[in-house]
Amino acid sequence: MAQGTLACTAAGGLIVDVEGERYRIEAGDVKGLIFSGRPAPVMRERCEGVTGLTIEGHAAVHPAGRAVVIRTRAGAWIVPLASFQRVACGEEVRAPVLGLVSESDRLLSESLSTYLRDSTP
């Protein structure tokens, strides 16, 4: 389960650092996410000599309303909503980003453990 950090930019946006990648959520999108519950695009900074940003995923408030789920092609992470709001408002410098275990990963690990248990003499 990979962990990372969520930090605020000077312009009011957010930076998500996870698994060696850096993602951004723009200031206007952060406000829409917090106050209206609108999903926000998550953009990755390109370092391969190409300038600009590419949309790699989205951030949305979890249906339970207690966390923000950040999903990209590389995986999914969760930040408690209270921590997300504190960082976005500048009350905190950073917050932890916790990795999510997907349903398919969980099912795969269960099937592997069952297979290994059944195949041992």
Image: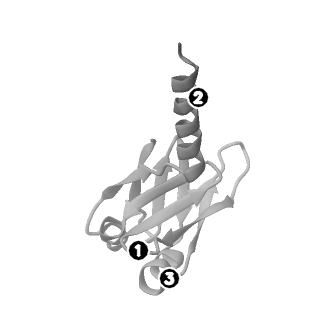
Measured as percent of width and height from the top left, residue 2 is found at 45, 42
Measured as percent of width and height from the top left, residue 61 is found at 46, 73
Query: Which residue matches tag 1?
Result: 64
Q: Are marks 1 and 2 in contact (CB under 8 Å)?
A: no
Residue 98 versus residue 82 in the image, above or below: above
Q: Earlier in the sequence, mark 1 or mark 3?
A: 3
Q: Which disc is residue 115 wearing? A: 2
Q: Which disc is residue 114 wearing? A: none
Q: Amino acid type of disc 1?
A: Ala
Real-space CA distance between mark 1 and mark 3, rounded to the nearest whole angstrom: 18 Å
Placement of the N terminus among the 4 image quadrants = top left
Badge 2 crowding class, 10 Å Cα cut-off, few under 14, some 14 to 19, many 20 or more, is few
Q: Earlier in the sequence, mark 2 or mark 3?
A: 3
Mark 1 vs mark 3: in front: 1
Answer with left or right where residue 54 lies relative to residue 85.
right
Disc 1 secondary structure class: loop
Badge 1 crowding class, 10 Å Cα cut-off, few under 14, some 14 to 19, many 20 or more, is few
Residue 20 versus residue 52 in the image, above or below: above
Disc 3 secondary structure class: helix
Q: Earlier in the sequence, mark 1 or mark 2?
A: 1
Mark 2 vs mark 3: in front: 2
Residue drawn at x 57%, y 45% as measured from the top left: 107
Residue drawn at x 47%, y 86% as measured from the top left: 36
Query: Which residue matches tag 3?
Result: 32
Disc 2 secondary structure class: helix
Residue drawn at x 47%, y 49% as measured from the top left: 17
Q: Amino acid type of disc 2?
A: Tyr
Q: Are marks 1 and 3 in contact (CB under 8 Å)?
A: no
Real-space CA distance between mark 2 and mark 3, rounded to the nearest whole angstrom: 46 Å
Badge 3 crowding class, 10 Å Cα cut-off, few under 14, some 14 to 19, many 20 or more, is few
Measured as percent of width and height from the top left, residue 79 is found at 39, 61
